[in-house]
Image: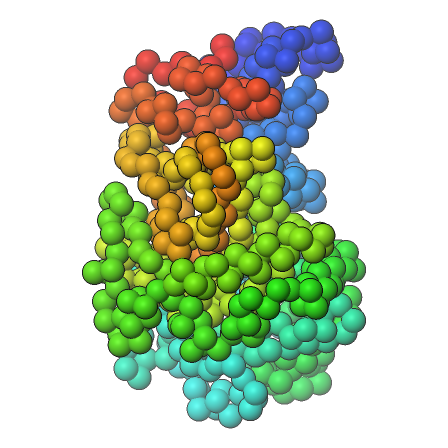
């Protein structure tokens, strides 16, 4: 490692302050060398030097994912937690690549743990002293904010389910076992064994910014009511008190209650003998919706309100071509499906006979009826014509629309529960069960035309299981290119190119590398649903490819290289004219996983 530091220091050669005279290619090479130097310095414990090298890379090249990530790691190790958090926030928006997103998410989790560990003279101890908490109670408070959401307790205590049931409000949406299977972080529930957590789902609204009810999940372990429930906002919302445990304001993932929330809960129930009761927790959630709580509350509350205003405005302008979407009943959702799929789900029959195996681990089936696909597309067209502001799905789709942001979240949630979840559970049962339990989604439209987004670069999804359904229209080209699974020797080897058909859905794990080749005529619009499950994401298996990244055996297939992510793209293809700024910024394959004879595209 020490030799690597010296080698990279020698490779840098030019001071960042002198870089203005360099060509763009030379600046990119210098930035990459500085990032590599920072990584080597981190490995030998030279944290301050690593921070300086990463900062120099940012000065040379601007805000790249690699430089921001390396500087964030260095700053965490130096104890500069606020600055590390800011870097990770910027890094999270720099790439939609699943591997990069997971890398940032794992570092955010480490940052959260560092923040908790750094509070012996701070937040936790102040709370413990103020409310007379024992050491064990303080640890339980920290665990509620940071440990895996569905973690099964090793305690010998038993949850008093009947006593808890008596606290459940009459308007509860759900109360019962969490039903998270043993393949993630939770052991199976045996008869009479209540070590598995129980869940309560409730809808809560409050204040000017959160007028529409949001669904919250409370999870109770065997130590309840001595220990607090874990709390999560299930609905897609932005709120400063529900951003943990990673510390990220990512509206599509955990939305866990933070230490700030539990501090408020302690204060609200200080005079009560049951400080963590269901009623007290619900009151605290409602107060958090009505009054500022958590860092950046006002800013995030305004963003949430702006999103709701767009939904409200579109409600008065939409085409009403698909009235079953607003709001959807279970029967209406099932009636949107292709007849054979609807019949199979209605009768509990296997869906496998309805699925075509496109390649290993990739399946296709008729999801919607063609009539419904046309009606759904008419609603999307109506939104495009409305002129209302739209948030784009990610950095790779410039003309798409997040359908959850235009009023379709209830429909997608019902579709996930009734249709996508059982299909994923059956198709991927032989996998390490990423499809076993969904509790979140990111749903959006992608749109391809020759004069707009004409293709999609090769990538992986920040999704556990992806469902990709073609809605229309008449088009040629734009096939879906499938390669291998991330972290495997075949990661960048081509397996198949799939041709879309209207109302037909392709389903695959998010870790599979794929992309869309160029459209040659017409226009294609697809509904993409990224499905997430906290139990899976908290499990060791979810990030195994980051720990056990296997070397590539042979050079990649040119159809599977990415100009956004690969270090050797130019060795196999020419950069598109408007994408040359990606040259030298790739991360794949990571050091140590290169194929024999690998050469980066820049010296």
Residue 81 image-quadrant placement? top right
Percent position of residue 305, x then y: 74, 63
State whether residue 511 is above or below residue 333: above
Percent position of residue 262, x then y: 64, 69
Q: Is residue 20 left or right of residue 539?
A: right
Residue 288 image-quadrant placement? bottom right
The residue under the point 67% across, 53% down is 385
Q: Is residue 466 visible?
A: no
How many tags in the picture? 0
State whether residue 23 is above or below residue 265: above
| Frontmost residue, 170 versus 355 | 355
Q: Is residue 519 left or right of residue 87?
A: left
The residue under the point 70% across, 68% down is 316
Percent position of residue 129, x then y: 69, 69
State whether residue 128 is above or below residue 248: below
The residue under the point 48% across, 29% down is 565
The residue under the point 33% across, 13% down is 597
Residue 209 image-quadrant placement? bottom right
| Frontmost residue, 218 versus 268 | 218
Q: Is residue 10 left or right of residue 62?
A: left
| Frontmost residue, 356 versus 212 | 356
Quadrant placement of the N terminus: top left
State whether residue 284 is above or below residue 555: below
Give the colouring mode of the picture. Answer: rainbow
Q: Is residue 310 visible?
A: yes
Percent position of residue 274, x then y: 61, 85
């Amino acid at each position: 490692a020490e030799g690597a530091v010296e080698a990279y220091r020698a490779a840098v050669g030019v001071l960042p302050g002198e870089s203005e005279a360099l060509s763009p290619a030379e600046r990119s090479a210098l930035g990459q060398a500085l990032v590599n130097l920072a990584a080597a310095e981190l490995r030998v414990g030279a944290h301050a030097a690593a921070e300086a090298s990463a900062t120099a890379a940012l000065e040379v090249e601007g805000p790249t994912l690699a430089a921001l990530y390396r500087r964030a790691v260095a700053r965490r190790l130096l104890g500069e937690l606020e600055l590390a958090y800011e870097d990770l926030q910027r890094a999270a928006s720099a790439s939609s690549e699943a591997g990069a997103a997971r890398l940032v998410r794992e570092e955010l989790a480490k940052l959260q743990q560092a923040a908790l560990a750094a509070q012996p003279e701070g937040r936790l101890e102040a709370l413990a002293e103020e409310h007379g908490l024992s050491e064990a109670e303080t640890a339980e408070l920290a665990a509620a904010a940071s440990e895996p959401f569905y973690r099964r307790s090793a305690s010998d205590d038993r949850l008093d389910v009947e006593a808890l049931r008596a606290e459940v409000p009459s308007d509860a949406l759900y109360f019962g076992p969490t039903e998270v299977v043993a393949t993630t972080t939770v052991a199976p529930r045996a008869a009479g064994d209540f070590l598995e957590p129980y869940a309560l789902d409730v809808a809560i609204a409050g204040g000017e910014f959160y007028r529409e009810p949001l669904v919250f999940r409370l999870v109770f372990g065997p130590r309840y009511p001595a220990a607090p429930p874990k709390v999560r906002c299930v609905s897609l919302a932005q709120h400063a008190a529900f951003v943990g445990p990673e510390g990220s304001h990512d509206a599509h993932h955990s939305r866990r209650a933070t230490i700030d929330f539990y501090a408020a809960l302690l204060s609200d129930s200080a005079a009560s003998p049951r400080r963590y009761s269901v009623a007290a927790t619900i009151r605290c959630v409602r107060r958090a919706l009505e009054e500022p709580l958590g860092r950046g509350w006002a800013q995030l509350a305004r963003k949430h309100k702006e999103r709701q205003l767009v939904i409200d405005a579109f409600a008065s302008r939409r085409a009403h071509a698909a009235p079953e979407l607003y709001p959807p009943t279970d029967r209406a959702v099932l009636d949107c499906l292709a007849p054979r799929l609807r019949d199979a789900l209605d009768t509990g029959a296997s869906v496998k006979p309805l699925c075509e195996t496109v390649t290993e681990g990739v399946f296709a089936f008729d999801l919607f009826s063609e009539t419904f696909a046309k009606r759904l597309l008419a609603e999307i067209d109506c939104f495009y014509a409305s002129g209302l502001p739209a948030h784009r799905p990610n950095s790779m789709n410039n003309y798409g629309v997040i359908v959850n942001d235009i009023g379709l979240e209830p429909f997608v949630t019902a579709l996930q529960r009734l249709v996508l979840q059982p299909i994923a559970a059956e198709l991927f049962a032989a996998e390490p069960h990423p499809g076993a339990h969904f509790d979140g989604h990111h749903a959006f439209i992608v749109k391809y035309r020759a004069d707009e987004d004409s293709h999609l670069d090769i990538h992986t999804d920040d999704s556990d299981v992806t469902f990709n359904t073609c809605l229309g229209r008449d088009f040629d080209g734009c096939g879906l290119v499938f390669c291998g699974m991330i972290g495997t020797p075949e990661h960048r080897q081509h397996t198949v190119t799939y041709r879309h058909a209207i109302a037909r859905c392709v389903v695959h794990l998010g870790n599979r590398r794929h992309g869309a080749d160029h459209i040659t005529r017409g226009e294609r619009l697809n509904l993409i649903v990224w499905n997430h499950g906290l139990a899976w994401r908290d499990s060791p298996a979810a990030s195994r490819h980051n720990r056990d990244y296997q070397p590539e055996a042979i050079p990649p297939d040119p159809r599977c290289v990415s100009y956004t992510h690969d270090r050797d793209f130019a060795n196999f293809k020419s950069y598109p004219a408007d994408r040359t700024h990606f040259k030298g910024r790739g991360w794949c394959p990571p050091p140590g996983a290169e194929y024999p004879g690998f050469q980066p595209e820049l010296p």
